[in-house]
Image (cartoon, rainbow, N blue to C red):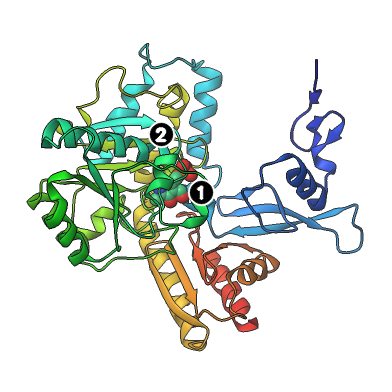
């Protein structure tokens, strides 16, 4: 029988005699290329090692003179794990809560078939902060969307009275809700779908931010439509912010046609856009919403669905479940992720630092109007889009930023998203902006 010898911690962690701390960036890349799935193409020549402070990481890069060695540099984290670390890397309030509960409180691991006391803390916190009647914990962000999708269909049959198996769920073009089969069935990104079919039926897409298209579809097929499931701001599509009145009109249309408004706040929630949840920017209240990413404070994958009693209350024992959704450690982390968002005024911080960053980006645009086409964002969910020209390549920007000690990543070829931790300091915003200016100038 095959065996493996694992020993030590951190840089001294070794697997079958290979010490992790000895590996160069090239060797890490080689192991990933040989042993891992090839579904990502991470930035070349850099390996993250540890945290220095809430927005600074320590990265290993190849030694300029010796390929058998590496150097270590500080990297400003301009992406914070795609908004999973809004509370800042290794947020000490959450870390202390985890350590205290594991070491002193002797936190158990139990499934949902028996109650544990931390679930109450999480449900009380999550219903209070979302203003929703009920919350159902899940693990990854996509699971919160997938469960919302199922609940919307069930509501369509049991409340709205859609004939069996005829329910339609409407989405927006350019959407991103994750990688499950239902989520990629919902997507119009061909790369996410190639040879994964057949896909989940009963899905229709309308252009994002186009009320007329939605009205037309609702008028044509409204009696079969259970829900419109949509991101308040489209993150992966390149931070696409809808018109100020879009969601007011969407909400009115949904009410008129008895259709649920389901919002995916996985990337936009937890203070990111300058409000606790982005739908609050637009003056609407969804019937059901999904959260993930920063719901786990960057420490654990925690997600949840929140919604009205008459919607979430349709689930019965046996219809849905998750071994790790809301298990004791996740409940503690989820509760403290909310506590930090509230106590540290993260939404307000995002609004202030976001305005600073957007001003800087607009200033850069005014210096390089031939290169930067648009600057977009709300709070600290920001992006700049370059003109579609060969020299204006987002990957080149990401590499250039890394050379200048900043981590950010292109989304699509010409757009670069900047979404640092909401705890970022004013000077760090200036550092980030100066690096962007320098790279854009060099293109
Ligand atoms: C809006 C949105 N929904 C869902 C997801 C999926 O989250 P996860 O990768 O945790 O499954 C993402 C991830 O980027 C997202 O941005």
Tell me the crowding category of disc 1: few under 14, some 14 to 19, or many 20 or more residues within 10 angstroms, Cα based: many
Residue 431 in the image: above or below residue 11: below
* Along the viewing direction, whichever of 268 and 340 lies nearer the viewer: 268
Q: Position of residue 151 (x, y in %)?
A: 26, 34
- Given contact means CB atoms under 8 Å apart, are the residues at marks 1 and 2 in contact? no
Looking at the rendered image, the quarter that the N terminus falls into is top right
In the image, 326: left or right of 287? Answer: right
Q: Is residue 245 visible?
A: no
Q: Earlier in the sequence, mark 1 or mark 2?
A: 1
| Residue highlighted by disc 1 | 88
Instruction: Please count the marks in the image.
Output: 2
Q: What residue is shown at x 36% (from left), y 17% (from top)?
A: 117
Tell me the crowding category of disc 2: few under 14, some 14 to 19, or many 20 or more residues within 10 angstroms, Cα based: many
Q: Position of residue 77 (x, y in %)?
A: 58, 57
Instruction: Calculate the distance from the C-alpha at mark 1 to the C-alpha at mark 2.
Output: 15 Å
Give the secondary structure at mark 2.
Answer: helix
Residue 77 in the image: above or below residue 242: above
Q: Position of residue 264 (x, y in %)?
A: 33, 48
The numbered disc on residue 334 is 2
Give the secondary structure at mark 1.
Answer: loop
């Amino acid at each position: 029988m095959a065996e493996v010898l694992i020993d030590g911690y951190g840089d001294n962690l070794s697997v079958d005699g290979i010490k992790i701390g000895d590996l160069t960036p090239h060797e890490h890349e080689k192991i990933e290329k040989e042993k891992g799935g090839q579904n990502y193409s991470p930035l070349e020549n850099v390996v993250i090692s540890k945290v220095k402070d809430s927005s600074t990481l320590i990265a290993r890069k190849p030694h300029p003179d010796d390929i058998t060695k590496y150097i270590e540099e500080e990297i400003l984290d301009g992406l914070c794990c795609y908004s999973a670390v809004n509370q800042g890397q290794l947020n000490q309030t959450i870390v202390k809560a985890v350590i205290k509960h594991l070491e002193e409180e002797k936190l158990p691991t139990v499934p949902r078939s028996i109650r544990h006391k931390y679930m109450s803390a999480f449900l009380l916190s999550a219903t209070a902060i979302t203003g929703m009647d009920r919350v159902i914990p899940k693990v990854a962000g996509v699971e919160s969307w997938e469960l919302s999708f199922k609940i919307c269909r069930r509501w369509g049959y049991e409340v709205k009275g859609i004939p069996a198996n005829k329910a339609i769920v409407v989405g927006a073009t350019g959407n991103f809700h994750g990688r499950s089969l239902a989520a990629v069935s919902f997507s119009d990104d061909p790369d996410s779908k190639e040879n994964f079919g057949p896909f989940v039926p009963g899905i229709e897409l309308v252009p994002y931010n186009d009320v007329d298209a939605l009205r037309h579809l609702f008028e044509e097929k409204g009696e079969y439509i259970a829900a419109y499931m949509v991101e308040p701001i489209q993150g992966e599509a390149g931070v696409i912010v809808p018109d100020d009145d879009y969601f007011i009109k969407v909400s009115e249309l949904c009410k008129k046609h008895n259709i649920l408004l389901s919002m995916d706040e996985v990337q936009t929630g937890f203070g990111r856009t300058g409000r606790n949840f982005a739908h609050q920017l637009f003056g609407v209240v969804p019937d059901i919403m999904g959260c993930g990413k920063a719901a786990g404070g960057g420490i654990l994958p925690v997600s949840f669905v929140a919604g009205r009693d008459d919607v979430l209350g349709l689930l019965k024992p046996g219809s849905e479940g998750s071994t790790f959704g809301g298990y004791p450690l996740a409940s503690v982390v989820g509760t403290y992720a909310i506590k930090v968002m509230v106590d540290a005024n993260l939404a307000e911080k995002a609004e202030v630092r976001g305005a600073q960053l957007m001003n800087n980006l607009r200033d850069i645009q005014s210096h390089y109007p031939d290169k930067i086409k648009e600057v977009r964002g709300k709070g600290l969910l920001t992006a700049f889009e370059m003109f579609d020209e060969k020299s204006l390549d987002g990957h080149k920007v990401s590499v250039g930023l890394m050379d200048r000690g900043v981590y950010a990543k292109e989304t699509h070829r010409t757009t670069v998203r900047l979404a640092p931790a909401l705890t970022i300091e004013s000077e760090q915003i200036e550092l980030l902006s100066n690096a962007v200016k320098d790279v854009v100038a060099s293109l």
